[in-house]
Amino acid sequence: MAQRIDGKEISKVVRGEVRTRAEAFQNKAGRQPGLHVVLVGQDAASQVYVRNKERAAAKVGIAGEVHRLEASTPQAELEALVERLSADPNVDGILVQLPLPDGLDAAPVLERINPSKDVDGLHRDNVGALWSGEAGLVPCTPQGCMRLLREADVKLEGAHAVVIGRSALVGKPIAALLLAANATVTVAHSRTRDLAAVAATADVLVAAVGRAKMVGADWIKPGAAVIDVGINRDESGQLCGDVDFDAVEPIAGAITPVPGGVGPMTIAMLLHNTVVAAERRYS
């Protein structure tokens, strides 16, 4: 039976580390690290995510502020707000909650975030830094996945890692992080021929496609570490991942559950990125 990688417990460790660093920053700078979230419109899921981020920030000593805008906000007004936050010396981290409402273009908004405050790691400067091995801010979910692997003592050097999914938010950045850890990386996707056979060669399998229970037992190499990034609903409405957990757990060496695996790490790494951004900007 696989080792369950407990994201809830590991995220508590990360938050404790952030709290300590936030206190040290406050003692040095005379203020708390500042995280500002821009929320446009009334999307229910986004509202929940932002409330969770706000509460989590307060608990670790980060000063959080949410800028709530109507869905009808003009593109120019949204971009102007991001530019003001980028220029504000008391703002260390900026996050624009995605997706934006119809009619608003996310790309130019994200490009107006000061890269040193881009705690989502989506600005082209941070993307370039990640792939070139330079210091930058790394997307939260991939960074959380790497921390889970490290806490589970999964050996990455020389391992074959297969990432299913090629999104800019998860698939591509985690491939870069795995390469930096000296794994041999295959990025697979919907057009990959015989996807199950490719997945079954993986010592480390990362599933990030958004299809409920797509990854079954015959996709898994015995003893492989399986990181399930998916958040879906199954046919009975229950929360589940991209991996058929019950089928895969007896075969894998280590596995993240859904819920309670990758999910808690995303907000924890957002808090981590905020305090890192504050430290770098103040040093």
Image (tube, grey):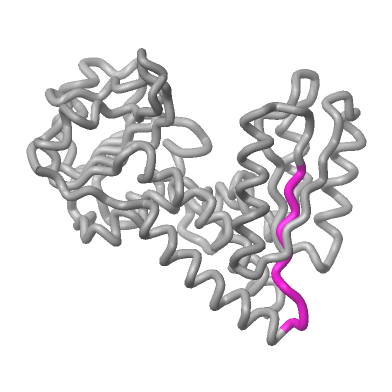
In percent of width and height, residue 144 lies at 42, 52
In percent of width and height, residue 192 lies at 30, 19
Residue plotted at (90% across, 28% down): 74
Quadrant housing the C terminus: bottom right
Q: Is residue 35 magenta?
A: yes
Q: Is residue 1 above or below residue 34?
A: above
Report the front residue among 41 and 137: 41
In percent of width and height, residue 232 lies at 42, 25
Q: Residue furthest top?
A: 235
Q: Is residue 86 left or right of residue 220?
A: right
In percent of width and height, residue 217 lies at 14, 26
Residue plotted at (83% across, 54% down): 85
Residue plotted at (59% across, 49% down): 121
Report the front residue among 128 and 10: 10
Q: Is residue 192 left or right of residue 273?
A: left
Residue plotted at (54% across, 51% down): 267
Q: Is residue 39 magenta?
A: no
Q: Is residue 217 above or below residue 169?
A: above
Magenta highlight range? 29-38
Q: Is residue 154 left or right of residue 274?
A: left
